[in-house]
Image: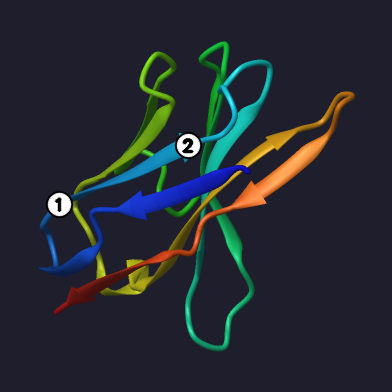
Amino acid sequence: QVHLVESGGGEVQAGGSLRLSCAISGLQFSAATMGWYRQAPGMQRELVATITSGGTKRYGDSVQDRFTISADNRKNTAYLQMDSLKPEDTAVYYCNLKRAVTPTYSYWGQGTQVTVSS
């Protein structure tokens, strides 16, 4: 069975930093994409950042230049370094692992709460 476990969420003041981790078990991070998404109350889930197993990164417009995604393929873990946090970054952050070519799959973690106070 495949599991994604997020950690590192919490509460921080505006301008502060947090680092999220997403550990994969049951599947090797290879020929796939890991991503971070977030969902605030009453809002749709939105893309934060993604990274392919080859290292290609993509960021949502609202976090560009503030957040950094990385991955350690040997540890099967992805990270999201969040700096210069703003109150509008408050959301539940979810980790996703997906593969778009056969065999396709998409797995989600349970989410971790990030709260930024002003």
Q: Which residue is found at the position 51% from the left and 15% from the top?
A: 55
26 over 9 or under it: above or below: above
**Picture coordinates of residue 58, whole percent (x, y):** 55, 32
Q: Which residue is found at the position 59% from the left and 29% from the top?
A: 27
The extreme front residue here reads 1
The extreme right residue here reads 102
Q: Which residue is mark 1?
A: 17
| Residue type indicated by callout 2 | Ile
Front in this rendered view, residue 62 or 72: 72
Front in this rendered view, residue 25 or 84: 25
**98 left or right, relative to 66:** right
Q: Which residue is mark 2?
A: 24
Q: Which residue is found at the position 56% from the left and 23% from the top?
A: 29
**Mark 1–mark 2 contact, CB under 8 Å?**
no
**Picture coordinates of residue 90, whole percent (x, y):** 33, 73
115 over 108 or under it: above or below: below
**80 left or right, relative to 92:** left
The extreme bottom residue here reads 42
Q: Which colour style is shown?
A: rainbow
Q: Quadrant of the C terminus?
A: bottom left
Q: Secondary structure at mark 2?
A: strand
Front in this rendered view, residue 49 or 32: 32
113 over 94 or under it: above or below: below
Q: For label 2, count other residues whose C-alpha is less than 10 Å away and answer few (under 14), some (14-19) or many (20+).
A: many
**43 left or right, relative to 88:** right
Q: Quadrant of the N terminus?
A: top right
- Say whether disc 1 or disc 2 marks the residue closer to the N-terminus: 1
Q: Is residue 3 visible?
A: yes
